[in-house]
Image (cartoon, rainbow, N blue to C red):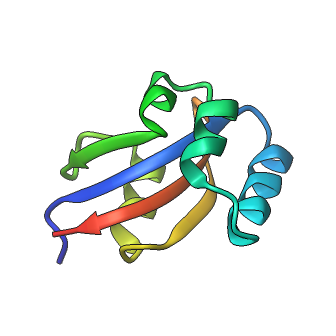
Amino acid sequence: MATKVRAAHILVSSQLRAQQLIGRIRNGESFEALAKEYSACPSKANGGDLGYFERGQMVKPFEDAAFNGKAGEIVGPVKTDFGYHVIKIIDVQ
């Protein structure tokens, strides 16, 4: 079982916007560039990179999605109290 995950995310206010961004990423657009342009999270300055985190450090729906994915995967949209997240799983340890 993963003990640490490194993930990046794009935080937006609507499920539709999140789905549109997932489509653009799957069509080859840069996750990092889209994060810098659209994300409402301060992590957008780093292309959405949140670094490594362990269980208990993120809100539960986000954490569950990140820990259930595989490195390289795009996960979402994931709804939390903050909005809708498009998550890129960078590494799982």
Q: Residue at x 58, y 53 (%)?
A: 31
Using the rendered image of the protein, determine whether residue 38 is visible from the camera's viewpoint. yes
Q: Is residue 72 above or below residue 41?
A: below
The quadrant of the picture occupied by the C terminus is: bottom left
Q: Is residue 62 above or below residue 48?
A: below
Q: 39 or 15, which lies in front?
A: 39
Above or below 60: residue 48: above
In the displayed structure image, the side of residue 22 where residue 32 appears, left or right: left
Q: Which quadrant of the rendered structure holds the N terminus?
A: bottom left
Image quadrant assignment for residue 37: top right
The quadrant holding residue 75 is bottom right
Residue 4, image x, y percentages: 17, 59
Quadrant in the rendering for residue 40:
top right
Taking 17 as reference, is 11 left or right? left
Q: Residue at x 27, y 44 (%)?
A: 51
Residue 47, percent across and down?
A: 48, 39
Q: Is residue 84 visible?
A: no
Query: Residue at horizontal 83%, vertical 54%?
Result: 20
Q: So how many labels did they put on this image?
A: 0
- Is 82 displayed left or right of 65 in the figure? right
Q: Residue at x 51, y 30 (%)?
A: 44
Question: Residue 32 location in percent, x, y?
Answer: 54, 46
From the viewer's perspective, is residue 91 above or below residue 39? below
Q: Residue furthest top?
A: 42
In this view of the protein, which residue sits in the foreground, 51 or 76?
51
